[in-house]
Image (cartoon, rainbow, N blue to C red):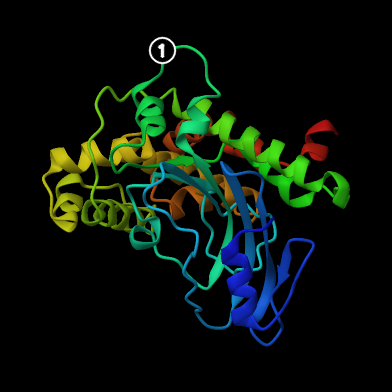
Amino acid sequence: MIPAILTRLARLLGTEIKNRQLDIPEEYGEGYCKGFVFNEHIRMLISNYRLNEDIIVENPEKDISRRILFFKFQHIFREPAARQPETAPSVLIATSRINTDEVISVHSNTATINIEVDAGYLSGLFDGPERSTVLQSLLQNTQPLVFEQIVSPSLQKIADEIVTIPVGETFERYFMRIKAEELICRLLVELERREEKHLYALNSKDIRAIYRVKQSMLEHPDTPPVIHELAVQASMSPTKLKRLFRQIFGDSIFHYYQAFRMQEAARLLKEKKLSVSEAGYRLGFSNLSHFSRVFEKHIGMKPKKYSVPALQLRD
């Protein structure tokens, strides 16, 4: 079986689905979309495409009465069809009480792996009553919650396997289900490490405000965030802003900003071939020794060593 939304998209584009995959016709854009319904509890949609113009497709299988958890893995394709700005890979997690399409903008440029899982089914897979507040709240799925997690190397590896490992038609559905569940399991292991003792129900207005703050902050990695200014931008108190930001992203505003800044520094050094001083100054560091210390704390090695190719280090 394949998700009904994929069938509906194929009909709108005037094309056919072959081996669960829809290839975007050239006149509409480029890329593909592939879907799996593994059973009544879990399904997955792999989307890596760019459309010349937006097409609105409503999900005919949307059922707000069911306790469904949504996992949207974003920016994880090595070669996305969608020409997106440099963005760190992340995963958006939401309960069925939140309409993620209303909260997070959906564009004609899409490069995601979406997985929907029945919360009751997922809860039944785990033994033991001791669960973190975050994990317990997700599995209960009784209030509107959104979390976002940076994709770790272990998660990225599984995502790469889903997208790149060729599997014959005989085993494809079985292979993809195992990988989808492995992806969710590893993600939940990481979420369980979060230390929130109390979670606040979220509304679409507050979520949009928090994401605007995040976007504004990351667009200017050379300028440290000022909490009061961000709170004014979000139309909420500094206390509420800091509380909701930590709840969604699992970190304080400044630590999240600093981690992103160091990821950007690593990209500038490795991909853009900037020198250590060029990368440091571009990211707002006037003291290169301080830049080196912060970079080593987050990346695990000094920026000069990180920027040197491995072959050169062995010579």
Residue located 36% across and 36% down the image: 141
Task: Establish if 187 lies above or below 162.
Answer: above
- Which of the 4 image quarters holds residue 31? bottom right
Task: Establish if 26 lies above or below 123.
Answer: below
Residue located 52% across and 53% down the image: 278
Q: Amino acid at mark 1?
A: Glu
Identify which residue, 269 or 163, lies in the foreground: 163
- Residue 157 in view (yes/no): no
Identify which residue, 296 or 247, lies in the foreground: 247
**Residue at the disc numbered 1:** 130
- Residue 244 in view (yes/no): yes
> How far across and how far down the image is residue 157, in percent?
69, 39
Residue located 71% across and 69% down the image: 22
> How far across and how far down the image is residue 235, in percent?
13, 55
Disc 1 packing (10 Å; few <14; some 14–19; many ≥20): few
Task: Establish if 315 lies above or below 192.
Answer: below
Tally of numbered discs: 1
- Which of the 4 image quarters holds residue 83? bottom right
- Which of the 4 image quarters holds residue 258? top left
> How far across and how far down the image is residue 201, in percent?
23, 40
Q: In this view, which residue lies farthest toward the bottom?
A: 27
SS at mark 1?
Answer: loop
Q: Is residue 180 left or right of residue 246?
A: right
Identify which residue, 270 or 95, lies in the foreground: 95
